[in-house]
């Protein structure tokens, strides 16, 4: 049947003029109502704002936890130092012994001066703090091994740690296209 003006679009084959009209505009357009687009964009913006807020809260909590662990490590180092001083302050010599003459000669010599820079002291303290943190983590892991998780006992139910929140998405994207592009 031939084409005429009444059923020009009834054919499954495009005419040259129809093909030329298709080149106008985007080939990847999407049909939807304006309200749906706006609703989707607003929902994405709310999610982005919520994720950023949650990420900031999680970062603050992580910093607080690190500070608490650092304080606990410092307390452990101080306690260890005090114990070493208490144990080391007891004299191993008897009260009546004066020491050998060779020890007195060594004492009369020019004393050796122990010099250490401030950077070396700070590095040494940081190294000791890191070792104390590692020891605390190791002890906590060993304590955790003793307690086996149990689904049926509420206080032994395993806990899920919060995962890092993805903050890479900073602007709404078109969800109808593949790959998604920024709006």
Image (cartoon, rainbow, N blue to C red):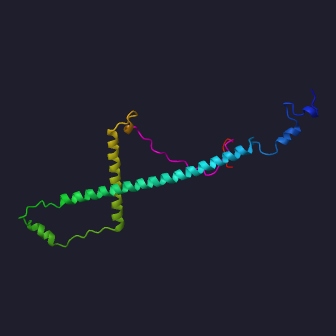
Q: Main secondary structure of the magenta part?
A: loop
Q: Position of residue 58 (x, y in %)?
A: 48, 51
At 44% from the left and 55% from the top, the residue drawn is: 63
Farthest top residue?
1
Q: Is residue 115 visible?
A: yes
Image vertical order of residue 8 relative to residue 106, above or below = above
Q: Taking 180 as reference, is 15 left or right?
A: right
Locate the N terminus by quadrant: top right
Total marks placed: 0
At 37% from the left and 39% from the top, the residue drawn is: 155
Q: Position of residue 23 (x, y in %)?
A: 82, 43
Residue 119 lies in quadrant: bottom left
Farthest front residue?
154
The question of residue 19 being in magenta is answered with no
Image vertical order of residue 107 relative to residue 63, above or below = below
Q: Is residue 167 visible?
A: no
Q: Position of residue 152 (x, y in %)?
A: 39, 33
The residue range painted magenta reads 157-176
Residue sitting nearer the eye, 124 or 3: 3
At 52% from the left and 48% from the top, the residue drawn is: 165
At 37% from the left and 54% from the top, the residue drawn is: 69
Q: Position of residue 33 (x, y in %)?
A: 74, 42
Residue 68 lies in quadrant: bottom left
């Amino acid at each position: 049947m031939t084409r005429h003006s009444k059923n020009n679009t009834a054919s499954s084959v495009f005419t040259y003029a129809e093909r030329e009209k298709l080149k106008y505009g985007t080939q990847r357009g999407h049909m939807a109502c304006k309200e749906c687009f706006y609703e989707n964009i607003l929902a994405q913006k709310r999610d982005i704002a919520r994720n950023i807020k949650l990420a900031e809260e999680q970062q603050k909590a992580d910093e607080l936890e690190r500070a608490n662990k650092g304080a606990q490590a410092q307390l452990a180092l101080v306690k260890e130092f005090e114990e070493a001083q208490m144990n080391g302050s007891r004299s191993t010599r008897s009260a009546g012994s004066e020491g050998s003459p060779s020890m007195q000669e060594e004492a009369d010599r020019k004393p050796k001066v122990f010099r250490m820079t401030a950077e070396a002291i700070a590095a040494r303290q940081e190294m000791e703090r890191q070792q104390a943190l590692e020891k605390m983590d190791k002890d906590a892991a060993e304590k955790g091994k003793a307690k086996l998780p149990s689904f049926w006992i509420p206080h032994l139910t395993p806990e899920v740690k919060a995962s890092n929140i993805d903050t890479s998405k900073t602007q709404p994207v078109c969800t109808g296209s593949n790959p998604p592009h920024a709006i």
